[in-house]
Image: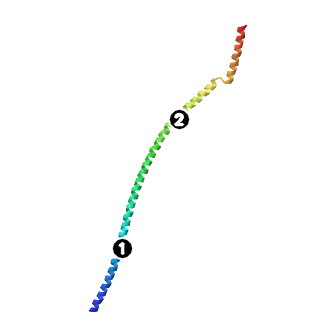
Amino acid sequence: MEKVLNLILNKLESLDHSVDSMDKRLDTLDQKVSSMDKRLDALDQKVNSMDKRLTADLKRHEDLIQQLIHSVASTNVKMNEMNEKLSVIDAKADQAIEQIADLRESAASKHDLAYYDQKISEHSRQIYKLNNQ
């Protein structure tokens, strides 16, 4: 019986060593899990921070796009107004060109003025001669 008890005692000691070894391994695993949990918390904070920045950037970009849309719309309105004004100016320019052409047709040329000046001078001389006779 003593042998059996010694065998049981040896087995118990062996089991105790195994339990101690498992306990140490469990402690190591627990430390690793705690370390990983801390890392996950840090990653979660970084993701939340990045999400906030991304949301803020998206909002800012959305605001800039809205400003750009309003600016383009305003520019289009101004361009339409300018096109209307240019159409009026084109019409007036066409009228002015027609009037200038009409004036050129009806106005005396430099040659004509020289001819009339010569004729007036000749007539003045003839009148002078007639008056002096």
Could you tell me residue 5's position as x and y percent? Answer: 27, 89
Mark 2 Cα within 10 Å, few/some/many (few <14, many 20+)? few
**What residue does disc 1 label?**
29
Query: What is the residue that sits farthest to the left in this orientation?
Result: 1
Residue underneath mark 2: 86
Whole-Å distance between the Cαs marked 1 and 2? Answer: 82 Å
Q: Residue at x 60, y 27 (%)?
A: 100
Residue drawn at (42%, 53%) of the image? 58
Disc 1 is placed on an element classified as: helix
Horizontal and vertical percent position of residue 84: 50, 35
The amino acid type of the residue labelled 2 equals Leu
Residue at left offset 59%, top offset 28% = 98
Question: Within 10 Å of the Cα at label 1, are there few (<14), some (14-19), or many (20+) other Cα atoms?
Answer: few
Q: Amino acid at mark 1?
A: Leu
> For residue 69, what is the image quadrant?
top left
Q: As drawn, is 108 to the left or to the right of 24?
A: right
